[in-house]
Image: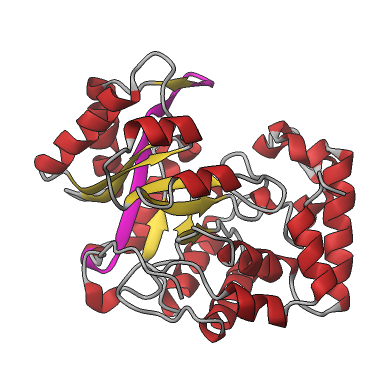
Amino acid sequence: MKSAKILLPVDTSNTGTPWLWIGTWSMGGEGFGPHDERESREVLELAVRYGIRHFDTAGLYAHGRSEELLAKFIGGRRPEFFISTKGGLLWKGRRVMHDATPAGLKGQLYRSLRRLKTDYIDLYQLHWPAPDVSIRESLDALKEFKEEGLIRYWGVGNLKPREVKENLRGERDIPHQVHFNPIHRADDLLLVGKDSCINCIISPLEQGLLGNGTSAAGRTALGKRDIRRRNRYFFDEKVLRWSERLRTMTDAYRVPVSVVTLLWIAARPHVHVIIPGPRRTGQVREILQFRLMSDEYGCSDGAELKSVLSEDKIRAAIPGDLWDHLNRGPFKD
């Protein structure tokens, strides 16, 4: 086990599994196909029942409805949970716009506080850097929110390696949400943030493409209003052939493709947190299977944010041809 980075939740007696968070984007009822709010609540309840207390959302998600769903679920149990949300992107009519100015971020933060029905956010992040605002100006605003007691920690998302170097030099343990999986590699970004960042992996299953649901078939399985139709991987023939081969291999070994993919991600260098976004209770059970297996490979529950699992143990447990297929990805065949 490599050295762990620390990020204490609100109440360390309820930490659950602080290196495994649940993302709520798809639970807001917008852009991911048919939606059942009752099942979204069941997803959250099942995750909590098995010790997960960290939840990630954003004001952008479903026009704020993901935050509202989370607030309804949490109710009067706020101290039990670690809630992260984000600002810097917002809806203007039907368009998504950048606003990472200090005033813009503060307005978005207050709206998130209202939707979440809380007087503080555990972690508030710059969702994306804005092209017309310096990142440092946005980060100074986040630091000011912390000083005012509105947030407990600040973080970033979707920075480029150069932007991490330039803007997080001298910082330590800053949560950075990084899009990473076997299809969408970002090894250089994980490496450059190894000292300054807590690398939090978003879209680990590439919006369901690396799962066993209907969306795993690619764009043809999606409705006309599904936002994943804009994801280039859902209609890239090379990606679809590679992912179909992956499912064939995992079926032969009788292990869910999502579990193997999450284990592979967890074993990569400089990965600290993984944030899958389940929509169905069956998907939560697969995530819980991953968590149980990860305990065997050197990452047990605890009060600190865990670093990478034991790659040697995971490699020994996953058949070599499957591991090599994940390592190569679709663009190295």
Q: Quadrant of residue 164?
A: top left
Q: Position of residue 12 (x, y in %)?
A: 23, 74
Dominant secondary structure of the magenta stretch? Answer: strand
Q: What coloring was used for the rendering? A: secondary structure
- Residue at horizontal 81 percent and vertical 61 percent from the top: 325
| 208 over 114 or under it: above or below | below
Task: Left or right? Give the position of 134 relative to 211.
Answer: left
Task: Left or right? Give the position of 34 relative to 221.
Answer: left
Please say whether residue 223 is visible from this viewpoint: no
Residue with the most extreme top position: 132
Query: Is residue 92 a member of the stretch shown in magenta?
Result: yes
Please say whether residue 317 is visible from this viewpoint: yes
> Which stretch did the figure color magenta?
79-96
Task: Left or right? Give the position of 7 relative to 180.
Answer: left
Q: Position of residue 86 (x, y in %)?
A: 37, 40
Task: Left or right? Give the position of 124 relative to 207.
Answer: left
Q: Where is residue 254 in the image (x, y as percent from the top left)?
A: 81, 80
Residue with the most extreme bottom position: 296
Residue with the most extreme left position: 148
